[in-house]
C-alpha cells in the first residue's frame, strides 16, 4: 500500500509507521516543519511537510495514496476553540482534500474513548452509545468522528476508538511510573475504578485491518482490551517490574481536586507543565473508563493478543532503559 500517516511522530503514529515499513508498504509521514521526528529514526519513509490546519498542504500530501491514517491532533489546549480547530476542523480539511484528490483513498481515523466519556463500572461502552464527552478534548474527538462518518457516502472511511494505550514510548501513563519510581503508590478513595487498557501493538493491528477490510467501511470500532484493570493494579504490576515496594498514599477526591487546581495555577503562572492537572483529576475520579471490543471481534475477527501485565512490564523496562525514570 501507498500510505500517508498524519501524527506519525507521536506514540501511536511511530508504532504504526514501523509496522507498515516492516511489511514493505510505501510510507509517507505528514509532519510540520518544526516536528521532532526522532521517533521515526531508522525507518524508510518520505517526509511530507504540512499541517492538518493548512488545506493546501493536504492536497499535495494525499495525492496518489491508497490509505490515509489520520492520527494527528492535540491532547492539550487552553481553549475549546483550539481543540476544535485542530482535531475537528483538521479532520474536515483532510476529508475535503481526499475528495479533491478523487475520493479513492481510504481514510482511517484514530478516534478516542474520550468521545464517549466515562462509562458505568458494570457496563462498558459499545459503539451504539451516544457521545457524552466529559471535556473539550473528548468533544473535539466526537466531532472529528461525526465529520468523518458524514463523508461515508463520498469517501471510504472508518474509525478506531482506542481507550488508554500502553507501550514503550508512551507519555500519557509516564506520570504513574514516575510516582512508582519515587516509591509512591497512588490510591484514590471510593475505588476501584475499572479502566480498559490496550497495548499499542494491538491498536496498530486493528488500524491495519481497518485499512483493508470492506466490513470496516462506514463503521467505528472500539479497541477493547483483553481485560480491565484499575489504576492501583497498573501501579502494582509496574512496581514489581521496577523492583520497588512503594508506600500507598491514599487521597480523597476532594484532596485530589485541590491538588489539581493548585497545579493548574502553578502551570499558568510559570508555564511549567506539571504531571497533575484538573483534566487528569477528572479522569481519575470517573467511575469507569471501559469499552467493549465485541463489535471488532464479530465483524473483523479482531481480538487483542497482548497481555496487559506484559505491556506494563515492557513500558517500565523501556522507561528505565531510555532514562525517562
Image (cartoon, grey):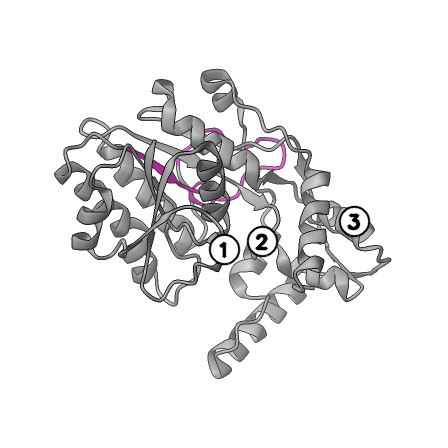
Mark 2 Cα within 10 Å, few/some/many (few <14, many 20+)? many
Q: Quadrant of the C terminus?
A: bottom right
Please provide percent x and percent y for residue 135: 43, 54
Residue linked to disc 3: 236
Residue linked to disc 2: 169
Please provide percent x and percent y for residue 72: 37, 51
- SS state under label 1: helix
Residue linked to disc 1: 39
Identify the residue at horizontal 28%, vertical 37% (top origin): 148
Front residue (pair 227, 203): 203
Front residue (pair 255, 39): 39
Front residue (pair 192, 38): 38
Residue 207 in sight in this render: yes
Q: Gap between marks 2 and 1, in whole Å?
A: 9 Å
Instruction: Name the front one of labels 2 and 1.
Output: 1
Question: Given contact means CB atoms under 8 Å apart, are the residues at marks 3 and 1 in contact?
Answer: no
Residues rendered magenta in the picture:
106-130
Left or right: where does residue 7 sit relative to residue 39?
left
Instruction: Name the front one of labels 2 and 3.
Output: 2
- SS state under label 3: helix
In the displayed structure, would residue 50 be above or below residue 91?
Answer: below
Identify the residue at horizontal 67%, vertical 66% (top origin): 255
- SS state under label 2: loop
Residue 113 in sight in this render: no
Identify the residue at horizontal 75%, vertical 50% (top origin): 238
Q: Gap between marks 2 and 3, in whole Å?
A: 20 Å
Q: Quadrant of the N terminus?
A: top left
Left or right: where does residue 314 sit relative to residue 138?
right
Amino acid at each position: 500500500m501507498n500510505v500517508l500517516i498524519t501524527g506519525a511522530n507521536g506514540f501511536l503514529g511511530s508504532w504504526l509507521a514501523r509496522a507498515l515499513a516492516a511489511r514493505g508498504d510505501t510510507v509517507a509521514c505528514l509532519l510540520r516543519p518544526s516536528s521532532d521526528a526522532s521517533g521515526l529514526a531508522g525507518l524508510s519513509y518520505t517526509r511530507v511537510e504540512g499541517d492538518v490546519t493548512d488545506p493546501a498542504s493536504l492536497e499535495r500530501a494525499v495525492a496518489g495514496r491508497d490509505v490515509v491514517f489520520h492520527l494527528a491532533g492535540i491532547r492539550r489546549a487552553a481553549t475549546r476553540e483550539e481543540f476544535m480547530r485542530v482535531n475537528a476542523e483538521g479532520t474536515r480539511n483532510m476529508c475535503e482534500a481526499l475528495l479533491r484528490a478523487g475520493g479513492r483513498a481510504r481514510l482511517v481515523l484514530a478516534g478516542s474513548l474520550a468521545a464517549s466519556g466515562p462509562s458505568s463500572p458494570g457496563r462498558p461502552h459499545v459503539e451504539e452509545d451516544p457521545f457524552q464527552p466529559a471535556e473539550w478534548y473528548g468533544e473535539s474527538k466526537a466531532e472529528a468522528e461525526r465529520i468523518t462518518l458524514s463523508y461515508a457516502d463520498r469517501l471510504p472511511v472508518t474509525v478506531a476508538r482506542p481507550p488508554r494505550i500502553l507501550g514503550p514510548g508512551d507519555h500519557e501513563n509516564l506520570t504513574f511510573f514516575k510516582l512508582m519510581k519515587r516509591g509512591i503508590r497512588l490510591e484514590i478513595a471510593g475505588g476501584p475504578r475499572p479502566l480498559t487498557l490496550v497495548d499499542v501493538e494491538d491498536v496498530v493491528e486493528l488500524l491495519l485491518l481497518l485499512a483493508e477490510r470492506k466490513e470496516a467501511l462506514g463503521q467505528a470500532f472500539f479497541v477493547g482490551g483483553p481485560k480491565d484493570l484499575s489504576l492501583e493494579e497498573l501501579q502494582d504490576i509496574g512496581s514489581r517490574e521496577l523492583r520497588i515496594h512503594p508506600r500507598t498514599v491514599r487521597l480523597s477526591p476532594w484532596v485530589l481536586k485541590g491538588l489539581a487546581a493548585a497545579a493548574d495555577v502553578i502551570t499558568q503562572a510559570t508555564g511549567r507543565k506539571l504531571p497533575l492537572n484538573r483534566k487528569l483529576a477528572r479522569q481519575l475520579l470517573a467511575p469507569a473508563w471501559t469499552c467493549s471490543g465485541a463489535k471488532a471481534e464479530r465483524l473483523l475477527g479482531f481480538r487483542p493478543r497482548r497481555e496487559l501485565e506484559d505491556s506494563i512490564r515492557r513500558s517500565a523496562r523501556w522507561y528505565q532503559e531510555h532514562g525517562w525514570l
